[in-house]
Image (cartoon, rainbow, N blue to C red):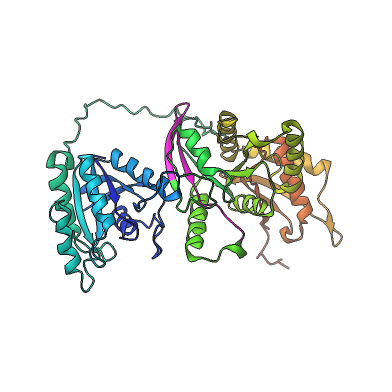
Amino acid sequence: MSFTVAIVGRPNVGKSTLFNRLVGKKLALVDDTPGVTRDRRPGEAKLVDLRFRIIDTAGLEVAAPDTLEGRMRAQTEAAIDEADLSLFIVDAKMGLTPIDAMLAEMLRKKGKPVVLVANKSEARGSDAGFYDAFTLGLGEPCPISAEHGEGMLDLRDAIVAAIGEERAFPEPEDVAETDIVLQPAPEGEEEDEEPVYDETKPLRVAIVGRPNAGKSTLINRFLGEDRLLTGPEAGITRDSISVEWDWRGRTIKMFDTAGMRRKAKVIEKLEKLSVADTLRAIRFAETVVIVFDATIPFEKQDLQIADLVLREGRAAVLAFNKWDLVDEPQAVLADLREKTERLLPQARGIRAVPISGQTGYGLEKLMQNIIDTDRVWNKRVSTAKLNRWLDGVQIQHPPPAVSGRRLKLKYMTQVKARPPAFMISCTRPDALPESYIRYLTNGLRTDFDMPGVPIRIHLRASENPFEGKRKKR
């Protein structure tokens, strides 16, 4: 992207609505409640012919540095320092407030280009607020309606005038011409049924858990900076915020999510939106780290979150956070291992790592377990190996007889990975008991080294070659 733009303003002036309009997706949560946005959220914006990086920020308020509002203000100021240009949003419908004047003074002191934007200018009676915006001393305001998409051409012209034509439309880099010769594949060479795991491909990881389990603190420790808003208050994170960083040369895109409480306790509309955003992050991710509070692990909600992640088919890793607060680590670790095997039988062998987001203990081991779990999640097994294995397990433990007729498992193949899914052709698939399917699932985990990931087994009735043919007399 050619330049970076930060959207700033006091609470509830429409910053997140404009952010969603510019990125073309409903990424940021929007509600009539002031102060919905708390972290700074980046995105790739498109405005007519402009392409730039944009940052949505929390509403600026006057507050002490050690309060939640004060920490939100620090996040917003960091976004202003990072950006090349600020869009200062004021509410033309409500008019100016003393906070608007204070923010205008702060932006002037930063010495960076500012575009004054009068949002909600479509509302009746907004003319007075629009003309009042001239008193801020930041030039002519640009009237827009972020909700209805009005005034976007004027906003585009104002951004180009503030940032300059050269920054707005950079010259494309010259690409050296090279002769590319495509080598034909060797004749007779068959495609490998068990592809090698790509250690360099980017990996999407979601961090989920109950409120105040330490998810944002964990990501900040990975990044080595206070990128996400943290504090002792439960439920600080509302949006699912994505951050990118490199681990041993591999790009990791990590999603911080809102804490998930029990469904009966989720009453407010805003919290429902946050939980829905978390569910979208889980479905988008490849590996999900479920953060447990090591001081009070395996609450009912922890198990429900883990079951949700596994039902979605994601690769899961357990992280027992706040390990620095545990008094007897060895005894607690043995107890956690026993409870993990007993309470999560649907993911036998799931990897669990004790960590501390506050001190950084165990983070390297956690990342290695994430990579190892993703490798298993992408695993493919050749059809020949599967059918030899199927013959062996049937000899060791034959399928049961139902209504006096023994079931036969004839053929097996892997139909997909991510997560591993297998199809078995058999007689009377509806009659095969669930206990035998669990036996096959556990056998696959053990014999093909696939611990801790969801395994799907689909049954299909074998085709009868004589079906539909009448016996000739």
Q: Which of 326 and 171 is in front in this view?
A: 326
Counting from the top left corner in percent of width and height, residue 50 is at 20, 48
The image shows residue 58, relative to residue 385, as above or below, that is: below
Counting from the top left corner in percent of width and height, residue 383 is at 63, 40
The image shows residue 290, relative to residue 433, as above or below, that is: above
Q: Quadrant of residue 80?
A: top left
Q: Quadrant of residue 183?
A: top left
Counting from the top left corner in percent of width and height, residue 202 is at 45, 36
Q: In this image, 340 relative to 279: left or right?
A: right
In the picture, which quadrant includes the C terminus? bottom right
Q: Is residue 149 visible?
A: yes
Q: Nearer the viewer, residue 169 or 353?
A: 353
Task: Please tell me which residue is depicted at 74% across the width and 41% down the height of the picture.
Answer: 443
Per the rendered image, the range of residues in magenta is: 242-262
Number of on-image labels: 0
Main SS of residues in magenta: strand
Counting from the top left corner in percent of width and height, residue 358 is at 55, 35
Q: Nearer the viewer, residue 145 or 408?
A: 145
Q: In which quarter of the image is residue 353?
A: top right
- Residue lying furthest right: 404
Q: In this image, 51 relative to 289: left or right?
A: left
Task: Please tell me which residue is depicted at 61% across the width and 34% down the height of the picture.
Answer: 355
Task: Please tell me which residue is depicted at 65% across the width and 65% down the height of the picture.
Answer: 468
Q: In this image, 204 relative to 9: left or right?
A: right
Q: Is residue 49 visible?
A: no
Q: Does the magenta stretch include residue 142?
A: no
In the picture, which quadrant includes the N terminus? top left
Q: Nearer the viewer, residue 203 or 356?
A: 356
Q: Does the magenta stretch include residue 245?
A: yes
